[in-house]
Image (cartoon, coloured by chain):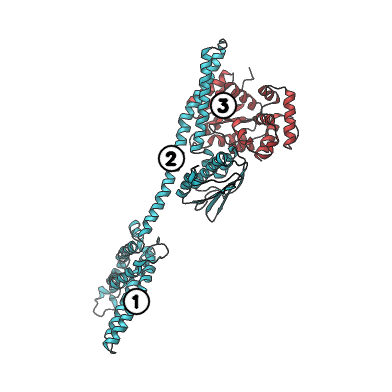
């Protein structure tokens, strides 16, 4: 069992909200508040001071991007609050806005809602974001990786590794995913950074992910 | 003219319309009166009936030649929407009838409408006027003067409507067709947005919740420690996989109906995102002044995504370029690829649909695609004033 977290949830669909609450409690986390719109999220976050907020992008009253806007307010108010933003669609534009506004101390995640169904992956992402990592949905990474010139210099295996890196995975996780040794992953990563002219291996995963994302959207 | 009269009857005397109406009527009336007086004078002049008649005929011919242009000119006083004069075969005939035959009536309306308050105003100068009349007359005249604006406006309005019906019969309908086409495009777009919202709030939310439930069920099953290859575990796993596929399909479908990033972040962001998903690398060169009208953004987005789909499917290109500029209130959008060319609207491939969609937004599509390539598609969509930023 991982370290239990205090998590506030903002999601307007009651069905889904209950599902997520149930799921997180199952994994030992505490959910002091689950709300259905932006203003209630702000109130709940101020009251409960959670470790992490799980936020739906589109909520009442406007049904546009109030979740994202509330998330930005929270980023400013509580710089150490980790944020996991969920959406039924992901676009690199929204991902960039979210990551651009983030404080380097707090973890940030941006995932498709349908990833919640992959229960273990989802709770893993929750834990990583709470620990300060950046997690970006594979769908966004796929968009970012699609058809960029210099990426053609990478081998298929290196592209795979880059994709997993951009999702915020550690070397160990990448190695498990690709069923190779960690040393092999480290070698691939060195090759990628070299080919993309990125600064060599930063100490933590987080800065590395950001470097990759910055490069990709550049 | 009549619209101004009908929509703001109380404000009407304060607008420019009564003056325009009076100008319209006087222009015709005075011209007609001058011709009548001239012809009458010439016919009774002391230089012989033949010379007089010839001179009078010359005046009538000259006046008839001027009547057409005069009618156009004065019609524009009371009809704002009138396009640039395009004289047709009716112009002269109608002008002669309207000015020379009905012009006296125009003059009569103005004289009667202004005459009564005019006489009242002048009553103090009448030698027979009683003392009370010298006071009450001007007061009543001053009160009646604005009232004169109404018969003048009404008569000028009616004359204007008849003149437009004869001189520019097609204009109104053209206008109406354009407007209804624009309404259709708007309705189409808002309908797409509504469908997107409904799917998002309905089916998609439920599927996501189902997906979570199935995930939880898998967890529960795993906790039971059932043997490998258990039927229930397999069935739930398959159901979960199907739900995930359905979600992915629904997500793509909704994006195709109306991408949310388009309504919330505008054309620039939406084009960037769709280009990011393109299998053929796309280079962007977009210079857009903030947000454009929603219908223009929707059409332009449709053009870009349709073009990128065509590039990926038919062109064999390895690279393409999307360029967008707004110049003189026209959005010019270009998609160019380095493929094999030979794209023909006649052969299907969605190009006719694309052209229709652009035409419905009052724009036009130009295509250059020689055999061997490259292919360049340009869409020009008028967009009024860019709003916001």
The kind of secondary structure element at disc 2 is: helix
Chain displayed in red: A
Q: Chain of mark 1?
A: B
Give the chain of mark 3: A
Viewport quadrant of the N terminus of chain A: top right
The secondary element bearing badge 1 is classed as helix
Neighbor class of circle 1 (other Cα within 10 Å; few <14, some 14-19, many 20+) is some
> Would residue A137 be found to the left or right of residue A189 on screen?
left
Q: Position of residue A206 (x, y in %)?
A: 69, 31
Q: Nearer the viewer, residue B101 or A102?
A: B101
The chain letter corresponding to cyan is B
Q: Is residue B36 visible?
A: yes
Q: Looking at the image, is B324 positioned above or below residue B116?
A: above
**To which residue does mark 1 refer?**
B63
Report the residue at 53% width, 16% height from top: B234
Q: Are marks 1 and 3 on the same chain?
A: no
Q: Earlier in the sequence, mark 2 or mark 1?
A: 1
Quarter of the picture containing the C terminus of chain A is: top right
Residue under numbered circle 2:
B191
Q: Is residue B17 or residue B92 the one in the foreground?
A: B92
Percent across and percent down for residue A53 are: 58, 28
Camera-nearest residue between B231 and B328: B231
**A34 over B377 or under it: above or below:** above
Q: Which mark is residue B371?
A: none
Total marks placed: 3
Q: Are marks 2 and 3 on the same chain?
A: no
Q: Look at discs 1 and 3 and give the one toward the viewer.
A: 1
Q: Which residue is mark 3?
A: A115
């Amino acid at each position: 069992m991982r370290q239990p977290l205090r998590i506030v949830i903002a999601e307007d669909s009651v069905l889904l909200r209950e599902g997520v609450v149930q799921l997180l409690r199952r994994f030992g986390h505490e959910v002091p508040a689950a709300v259905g719109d932006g203003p209630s999220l702000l109130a709940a976050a101020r009251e409960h001071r959670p470790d992490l907020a799980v936020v739906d992008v589109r909520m009442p009253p406007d049904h546009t991007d109030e979740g994202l806007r509330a998330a930005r307010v929270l980023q400013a108010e509580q710089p150490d609050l980790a944020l996991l933003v969920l959406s039924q669609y992901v676009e690199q534009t929204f991902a960039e806005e979210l990551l651009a506004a983030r404080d380097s101390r707090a973890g940030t995640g941006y995932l498709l809602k349908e990833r919640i169904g992959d229960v273990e992956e989802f709770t893993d992402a929750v834990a990583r974001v709470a620990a300060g990592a950046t997690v970006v949905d594979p769908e966004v990474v796929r968009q970012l990786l699609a058809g960029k010139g210099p990426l053609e210099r990478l081998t298929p295996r290196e592209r795979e590794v880059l994709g997993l890196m951009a999702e915020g995975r550690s070397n160990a996780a990448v190695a498990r995913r690709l069923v190779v040794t960690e040393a092999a992953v480290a070698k691939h990563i060195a090759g990628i950074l070299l080919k993309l002219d990125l600064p060599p291996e930063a100490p933590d995963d987080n800065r590395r992910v950001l470097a990759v994302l910055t490069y990709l959207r550049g | 003219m009549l619209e101004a009269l009908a929509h703001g009857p109380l404000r009407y005397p304060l607008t420019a319309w009564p003056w325009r109406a009076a100008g319209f009527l006087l222009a015709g009336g005075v011209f007609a009166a001058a011709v009548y007086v001239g012809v009458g004078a010439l016919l009774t002049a002391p230089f012989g009936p033949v010379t007089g008649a010839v001179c009078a005929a010359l005046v009538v011919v000259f006046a008839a030649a001027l009547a057409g242009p005069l009618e156009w000119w004065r019609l524009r006083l009371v009809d704002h929407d009138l396009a640039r004069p395009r004289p047709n075969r009716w112009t002269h005939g109608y002008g002669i009838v309207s000015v020379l035959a009905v012009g006296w009536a125009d003059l009569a309306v103005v004289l009667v409408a202004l005459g009564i308050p005019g006489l009242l105003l002048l009553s103090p100068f009448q030698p027979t006027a009683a003392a009370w009349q010298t006071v009450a007359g001007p007061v009543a005249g001053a009160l009646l003067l604005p009232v004169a604006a109404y018969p003048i406006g009404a008569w000028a309005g009616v004359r204007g409507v008849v003149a437009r019906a004869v001189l520019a019969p097609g204009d109104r309908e053209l206008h109406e067709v354009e407007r209804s086409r624009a309404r259709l495009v708007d309705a189409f777009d808002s309908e797409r947005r509504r469908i997107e919202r409904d799917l998002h709030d309905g089916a998609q939310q439920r599927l996501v919740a189902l997906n979570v439930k199935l995930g939880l069920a898998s967890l529960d099953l795993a906790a039971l420690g059932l043997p490998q290859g258990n039927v229930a575990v397999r069935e739930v796993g398959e159901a979960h996989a199907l739900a995930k596929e359905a979600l992915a399909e629904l997500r793509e479908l909704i994006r195709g109906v109306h991408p949310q990033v388009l309504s919330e972040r505008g054309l620039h962001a939406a084009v960037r995102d769709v280009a990011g998903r393109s299998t053929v690398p796309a280079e962007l060169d977009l210079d857009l002044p903030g947000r454009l009208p929603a219908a223009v953004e929707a059409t332009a987005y449709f053009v870009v995504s349709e073009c990128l789909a065509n590039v990926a499917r038919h062109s064999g290109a390895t690279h393409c370029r999307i360029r967008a500029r707004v110049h003189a209130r026209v959005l010019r959008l270009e998609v160019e690829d380095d493929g094999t060319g030979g794209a023909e609207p006649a052969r299907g491939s969605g190009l006719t649909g694309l052209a229709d969609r652009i035409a419905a937004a009052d724009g036009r599509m130009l295509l250059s695609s020689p055999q061997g390539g490259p292919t360049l598609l340009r869409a020009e969509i008028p967009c009024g004033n860019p709003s916001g930023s």
